[in-house]
Amino acid sequence: MQTIDNFDFKNKKVFVRVDFNVPLDENFNITDDTRIRAALPTLKKILKDGGSPIIGSHLGRPKGATDKYSLKHILPRVSELLGVEVEFANDCVGEDATAKAAALQPGQVLLLENLRFYAEEEGKPRGLAEDATEEEVAKAKKAVKESQKEFTKKLASYADTYVNDAFGTAHRAHASTALIADYFGADAKSFGYLMQNEINAVEKVLSDTQRPFTAIMGGSKVSSKIDIIKNLLDKVDNLILAGGMTYTFAKAYGGKIGNSIVENDKLALAQEIVNAAKEKGVNLVLATDAKIADSFSNDAKTGYAPVNNIADGWEGLDVGPDSEKAFAEVIKNSKTILWNGPVGVFEFQNFEHGTRVVADAIVEATKKGAFSLIGGGDSVAAINKFGLADEVSYVSTGGGALLEFIEGKVLPGIKAIRGY
């Protein structure tokens, strides 16, 4: 397998799959260009070599071509950051794209229109009636899969080489993230810098683990994290479970949780996790107290209570001081740290303190030599909100891809390049 560092892109046209799925305001201004900046090292390496990047990306979840999700809105910013006037193709597989790709000269850059304007990118049929029969559904799926082959082949025809730098979509077996790689030999495809860095960071946490290894899992639901929790129980020394899932655990053992968020159908599962941690010798750390509120609002009346004794009409929106102290002590004594999910409703200033304490503890541990990996949209948003992204080891751009990778799943976008 080629690596981007030992590849010479001189006079090569390179199809580069990036993740430019950036947030836009109502006037189509980019509100956070982090994902564009993340791809710059790869694009600049190709340009420095004398190659021609043909950039493919998605934006949003369109159900067809629509101005709202057009990549033309981000074109000026991409040009500005690259320092090159980037050309734009008003389609990704139409005549305009074909002609502009063919005419591309070394040092020039082409941005294709949103790949997801075509159902073939994701390989899923669109526009099916809600009452469609099984036969109609099967027929539609077969049709889009057949046309997906031509779509993928067309994209591949533009370039001599393929580079995947979109870790955020690596868990999807889409045309441009996985299937296209089959049209390039082993010596003509590679990961970009961002993709390789993401892989290295996760594999360092999971395979080159310095102990104690602590994972902090936040979020509202046990059900959304169950696979990763089970996988981590075989790897970690300490597992901190916090956020909204706290109250499912509290109720599972007979606690009163007031109006706190809870998954009543996952109470037995919560007990299973506690028992599994004991069997495997994992130090499971759960919140013992909470900062409570009389409504889901930053301006709500607040107080503190044990997580298993919250009065009716009140709900837990952050961890309390005892939990903060317990979490921080475990984190500060760790050598490997994985953080996915805030421990409270950090979007509200009055309920961000617990998440800030966790972030500060991770920074302190990192300064003492720990390797810290932050991943998942809300954790990344929190670390950025607190201005601490540069003080941890690695901040992942992947949400679902990161979780599935940690769960031990084979990601199609990775397998397509290195074969496993």
Image (spheres, rainbow, N blue to C red):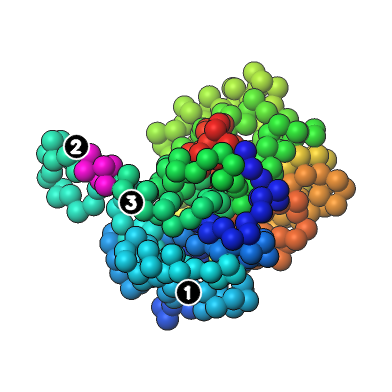
Viewer-nearest residue: 338 or 113: 113
Alpha carbon of mark 2 to alpha carbon of mark 3: how far? 20 Å
Say few, some or many: other residues with alpha carbon within 10 Å of mark 3 (under 14 / 14 to 19 / 20 or more): many
Above or below — where is 15 with respect to 223? below
Magenta residue span: 141-147
Name the quadrant of the N terminus. Answer: top right
Q: Are marks 1 and 3 in contact (CB under 8 Å)?
A: no
- Give the vertical position of 83 relative to 358 (above or below): below
Which label lies toward us, 2 or 3?
A: 3
* Label 2 – label 1 distance at C-alpha: 39 Å
Query: Considering only vertical position in the picture, is 59 above or below 336?
Result: below
Looking at the image, tell me whether mark 2 or mark 3 is earlier in sequence order: 2
The alpha-carbon separation of the residues under discs 1 and 3 comes to 21 Å
Q: Where is residue 209 in the image (x, y as percent from the top left)?
A: 76, 33
Q: Where is residue 83 in the image (x, y as percent from the top left)?
A: 63, 76
* Residue indicated by mark 1: 87
User: Quick one: SS at disc 1?
Assistant: strand
Percent from the top left, x then y, of residue 121? Answer: 36, 51
> Residue beneath label 2, please?
138
Residue 347 sits above or below residue 87 on the image: above
